[in-house]
Image (tube, rainbow, N blue to C red):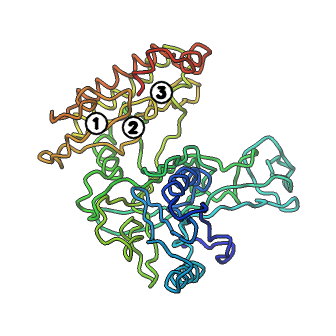
């Protein structure tokens, strides 16, 4: 079912950061400022796929296009010449007539802001407010002043066995993790569910979340069958091999659905949403291949710094590394990014903690890449990288590199604290020599 936007495209969608300078020879400074001011837009607009920019330096105008790995700029369009004026007018006319996706937005994602139910037609929801039904029972309702803001997102699921693509509608709260760099994977994370919030929502005006949606633009092979670094492939393999092991349940993500985001090419044909498809008429020799991917996983959890004691930390790390032992041993997959950001704390019904290892974006399937030289490519997060990754040497990466990352993580927590206590904040805010380790 395609997403229907609340209105057709308007001039307000023609959004670009503009920078002007008095003289033509100041175009380098204008570009530098354009780079700096464009970066926050990815955080402000979660449905942003790429950015437009404009610089006016004296008589010269440049149009810029910011992609996840590279920026492009037109030749100078001098408004004093007929050719320059024509080129600039052609651009603005074409821009004003282009589709939603060519403005840089994601057509499979739309923000909703609604009153989910009326007073005279209460619908059950989660929360403390209640009303009496015809049968006399109490059921929660949402009041007229309560508004629900959420994203409706199309998740494309790919079945590698049948090679079929299907879609599901996902309803997400505002981003938990947002893109904050100009050139990166632009990873964003949303909590939500597949249940329409018009039928059931939280009393706090949020979608009742049961899963996590992760979206981003990782480097990928254009051939989906040869995309050996695909996170969905990693999770499918892990779920298939370890799915019957009850002792590991909840210690690694369960893939609900996921695959490459797809977009209408303009003639009704759905194609992968990739840097190549966007730049088909601009750059035919793209060197960094990035594909827009989405996946929905369970369970939901909290950051590692929410552990309440050293005992809980030990339990969480034990859970995570016991899962990792099975993943590296039985599934032949290296995680390659053991860090504080990729371990979450999940709470059982009685409040006890358990750990889950997440984010297999950098993972490596040893069986599929036994002779691949990219096994030696640096991966991980400073300051948790193994020495092999820090030195970026040619030593074969093994599970010992991930265990070394765990030791670094424990040393880090032992130095800076296990949660947001005052001592932790004091060390983070100082210029102590230990901070050289972090960079």
Kindly report the distance in space between the C-alpha atoms of the residues bearing marks 1 and 2: 9 Å
Residue annotated with mark 3: 354
* Residue 385 screen position, x and y as percent: 32, 29
Image point 51% across, 80% down: which residue? 84
Q: Quadrant of residue 392?
A: top left
Image point 49% across, 48% down: which residue? 181
Residue annotated with mark 1: 327
The number of numbered badges drawn on the structure is 3
In the shown orientation, is residue 256 left or right of residue 26?
Answer: left
Q: Residues within 10 Å of mark 3 (few under 14, many from 20)?
A: many
Kindly report the distance in space between the C-alpha atoms of the residues bearing marks 3 and 1: 17 Å
* Residue 36 screen position, x and y as percent: 54, 50
* Residue 74 screen position, x and y as percent: 45, 71
Kindly report the distance in space between the C-alpha atoms of the residues bearing marks 2 and 3: 11 Å
Residue annotated with mark 2: 252
Which secondary structure, mark 3? Answer: strand
Camera-nearest residue between 43 and 397: 43
Camera-nearest residue between 350 and 164: 164
Asked whether disc 1 touches disc 2, contact meaning CB atoms under 8 Å apart, the reply is: yes
Q: From what the image shows, is residue 319 above or below residue 169?
A: above
Q: From what the image shows, is residue 345 above or below residue 87?
A: above
Asked whether disc 2 touches disc 3, contact meaning CB atoms under 8 Å apart, the reply is: no
Q: Quadrant of residue 2?
A: bottom right
- If the image is split into quadrants, where does the N terminus sit? bottom right
Camera-nearest residue between 123 and 265: 265
Q: Earlier in the sequence, mark 1 or mark 2?
A: 2
Q: Earlier in the sequence, mark 3 or mark 1?
A: 1
Q: Residues within 10 Å of mark 1 (few under 14, many from 20)?
A: many
- If the image is split into quadrants, where does the C terminus sit? top left
Which secondary structure, mark 2? Answer: loop
């Amino acid at each position: 079912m395609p997403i229907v936007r609340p209105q057709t495209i308007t001039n307000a969608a023609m959004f670009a950061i503009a920078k002007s300078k008095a003289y033509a020879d100041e175009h380098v400074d204008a570009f530098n400022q354009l780079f700096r001011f464009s970066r926050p837009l990815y955080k402000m607009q979660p449905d942003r796929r790429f950015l437009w920019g404009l610089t006016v330096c004296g008589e010269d105008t440049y149009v810029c296009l910011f992609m996840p790995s590279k920026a492009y700029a037109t030749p100078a369009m001098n408004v004093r010449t007929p050719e320059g004026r024509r080129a600039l007018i052609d651009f603005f006319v074409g821009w004003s007539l282009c589709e939603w996706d060519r403005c840089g937005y994601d057509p499979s994602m739309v923000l909703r802001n609604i009153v989910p139910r009326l007073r005279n037609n209460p619908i059950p929801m989660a929360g403390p407010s209640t009303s009496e039904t015809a049968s006399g029972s109490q059921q929660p309702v949402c009041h007229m002043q309560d508004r629900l803001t959420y994203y409706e997102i199309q998740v494309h699921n790919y079945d590698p066995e049948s090679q079929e693509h299907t879609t599901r509608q996902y309803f997400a709260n505002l981003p938990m993790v947002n893109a904050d760099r100009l050139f990166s994977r632009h990873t964003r994370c949303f909590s939500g569910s597949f249940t329409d919030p018009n039928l059931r929502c939280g009393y706090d005006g949020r979608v009742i979340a049961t899963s996590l949606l992760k979206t981003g633009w990782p480097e990928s092979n254009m051939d989906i069958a040869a995309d050996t670094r695909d996170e969905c492939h990693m999770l499918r393999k892990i779920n298939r091999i370890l799915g019957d092991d009850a002792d590991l349940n909840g210690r690694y993500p369960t893939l609900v659905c996921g695959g490459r985001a797809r977009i209408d090419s303009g003639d009704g044909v759905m194609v992968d949403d990739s840097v190549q498809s966007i730049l088909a008429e601009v750059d035919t020799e793209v060197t960094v291949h990035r594909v827009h991917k989405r996946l929905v996983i369970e369970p939901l959890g909290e950051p590692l710094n929410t552990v309440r004691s050293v005992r809980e930390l030990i339990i969480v790390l034990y859970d995570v590394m016991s899962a990792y032992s099975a993943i590296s041993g039985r599934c032949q997959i290296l995680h390659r990014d053991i860090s504080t950001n990729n371990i979450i704390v999940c709470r059982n019904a009685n409040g006890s903690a358990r750990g889950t290892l997440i984010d297999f974006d950098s993972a490596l399937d040893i069986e599929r890449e036994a002779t691949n030289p990219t096994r030696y490519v640096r991966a991980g997060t400073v300051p948790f990288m193994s020495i092999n990754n820090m030195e970026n040497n040619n030593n074969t990466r093994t599970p010992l590199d991930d265990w070394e990352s765990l030791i670094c993580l424990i040393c880090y927590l032992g130095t800076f604290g296990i949660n947001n206590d005052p001592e932790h904040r004091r060390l983070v805010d100082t210029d102590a020599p230990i901070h050289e380790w972090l960079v």
